[in-house]
Image: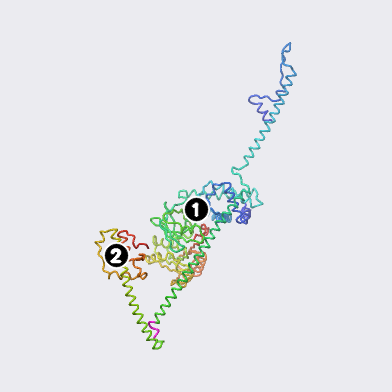
Amino acid sequence: MDIPAMRANFSKAAAAGDEAPLYFYSHLFLTHPDTRQLFPLSMAHQRDRLFSALGEVVARVDDLDSLVPILQELGRDHRKFGTVAEHYPAVGASLLATLQHFDDGWNAQLAHDWTAAYQLVAKVMIEAADEAADQPAWWEADVVAHERRTIDIAVLRITPREPFEHRPGQSISLETDIRPKLWRYYSPANARRPDGTLDIHVKARDGGPVSTALVRRVGVGDVLRLGPPMGHLTFDAGSDRDLLLVAGGMGLAPLKAVVDEVARNGPPRRVDLFVGARLEDQFYDRADLQRLEQEHPWLTVTLAVSDDKESALEQGDVGDVVMRHGPWLSRDAYVAGPAVMVEDTVARLVGHGVRRERIRTEVFAPSRPGPSVDGEVTE
Amino acid sequence: MTSDEHEAGAGDRRISPADLHHVRFTRATMLRPGYSDTEVDHFLYRVADELTRLHAEKAALRDRVRTLQSQLDDVPADVAPSDQAVLLLATAQQTADSYVAEAEDFSRQMTSDARAQYEEQLRRARESAGAIIQAAQEAAARMVGGGPAVVSAEPRERTTQELEEQVAYLKAFGQACRTQLRAYLEALLTDVETEWGRADPASLIQAPLRAPAQRAPQGGGGTTALNVAREVPLDDGPGGDAAAGEGGVEVAVRR
């Protein structure tokens, strides 16, 4: 395989911007009209996603050790979209047609290499999907409680109909019939419970089709579909160090799951949870945090506001407030929230002397379609 | 043609033009009762011509079948769509996308404007509430301590007088409040018991009326709508929950 030539060829298609994926999907839907139903009405975000995923593959094509796990996860994850092995050759043909269309220097060698590369990618994805075949492709879950906590935040409690196992800190993808084929990632705010229920914290993003539907339209009795759990802020159960948890906004959910995990399964240790928000009103889960703090002597919860002078809570960015307490040198740190907050907090912690490998982070970005390789989750 | 000859050589024998050329008819004896040589020869030539023409036509048809067949093999099962078709679908998709994006953008603007307005109003309300509380505290401080040290004797007398007046007023107001509140609560209780009794007559006899004096303090928190006794929505009517709990009566449970 002539990888430099393939990269050069791919970059020509990538340089065409939206044109290239537009061509790809139009080609695919014309040759295989049955694939159209696997995609949402608006394809705009889908197109971004396809080429960034392909770019990822092309960038790592000579580093199979890191590429294969990504492909395996992609393959498993694609089951929930209703993708089956028969779809892969169709996609491959349209991909080749696209790469050919945007490259005047297309030749038989490129066609051969891309065919081989695509077959490899498809093989890894299909095999991973097949290996996961004992698991459902998706889980149906009933909404058993829906609480509006603020004007744009709701806490949903859902019960998967089949056993669903996630580890604290992981995220799961959700789809509602109100917004078909649009999957968004959320972090359950609890560890595994005997009754299998999951708490999902959702903030309605302005103009966000799924989050607004989950907050304002979904109610008790509705059914959501869940994809398999994934994500990178997974709780390190092997460590018994004390914990420092720093949450910004909706980043509270996975960290609350960590608190829940310590409460349920131990080992016992000190846990300091800092939660930051702009305004005091935005602490949508304050009552429950107070309850947890009262129930568990090892837990300390500190709330910080960054833009609310009237508030009697701690003032300042949450990273700053964390630094006023401490020291944190002996802690495992988990940081989840908006990118700016995560970067700021991690920089402060590292400056403070916390070892980088003991800091786990998860960036919550508005309406990202899914965790990227870096693990982004919908806020 | 060669295959033809090959076929002809094997299996059942077919007449080739050459066969017809070389065919020889044996003459009959003596008196020539056989065919006319010229006629037979003429006929044989015609047959040979016809056969030649047929063979040529057959070969041409076979060639045509072959080319068509190979064309069919070259074409993949799914015919590649023309660039024009792809472009057409792409444009349609883009149009749909732009409508969805427009709708999302509109909703984004609406909600963010609404949120900004909501936060601003809340902020203003908080500020004015803070200002009112502060003013009240300052006024209280003036009334209680700070005043006498600064002001002259005459104003102090007036202040003292004012204070007494205010105290008297407040006492009267308190008395009025208590009376109204008691009336209100009694009315409420009567209501509750009537409803309760209607739902569960047996319990009414067992539940003796409490003395009004016991009831009055319970309403201490209800500072609003003192003089609208019966008309008021029974939002925080005391005892409402108990009544509802016992008899399932829809009183005072609209929370």
| Tag 1 and tag 2, C-beta contact below 8 Å | no
Q: Mark 2 points at which residue?
A: B190
Residue depicted at x 37% and y 69%: B225
Query: Tag 1: residue type?
Result: Pro
Residue B93 image position (x, y, % from top left): 58, 52
Task: Name the chain letter of the residue that bears numbered label 2.
Answer: B
Residue B8 image position (x, y, % from top left): 66, 26
Q: Quadrant of residue A259?
A: bottom left
Residue B194 image position (x, y, % from top left): 29, 62
Taking the magenta stretch, the answer to whether it contains residue B147 is: yes
Q: Can residue A62 be seen in this view?
A: no
Query: Tag 2: residue type?
Result: Thr
Residue depicted at x 66% and y 51%: A105
Q: Name the residue under label 1.
A: A180
Is B86 or A97 nearer to us in this picture? B86
Q: Are marks 1 and 2 on the same chain?
A: no
Decide if residue A13 is on the left or right side of residue B20. Answer: left
Decide if residue A222 is on the left or right side of residue B2. Answer: left
Q: Can residue B100 be seen in this view?
A: yes
Q: In which quarter of the image is the N terminus of chain B?
A: top right
Most common secondary structure along the magenta stretch: helix
Q: Which region shows up in magenta?
A: B143-148
- Which residue sits furthest bottom? B153
Is B213 or A49 nearer to us in this picture? B213
Q: In which quarter of the image is residue B125?
A: bottom left
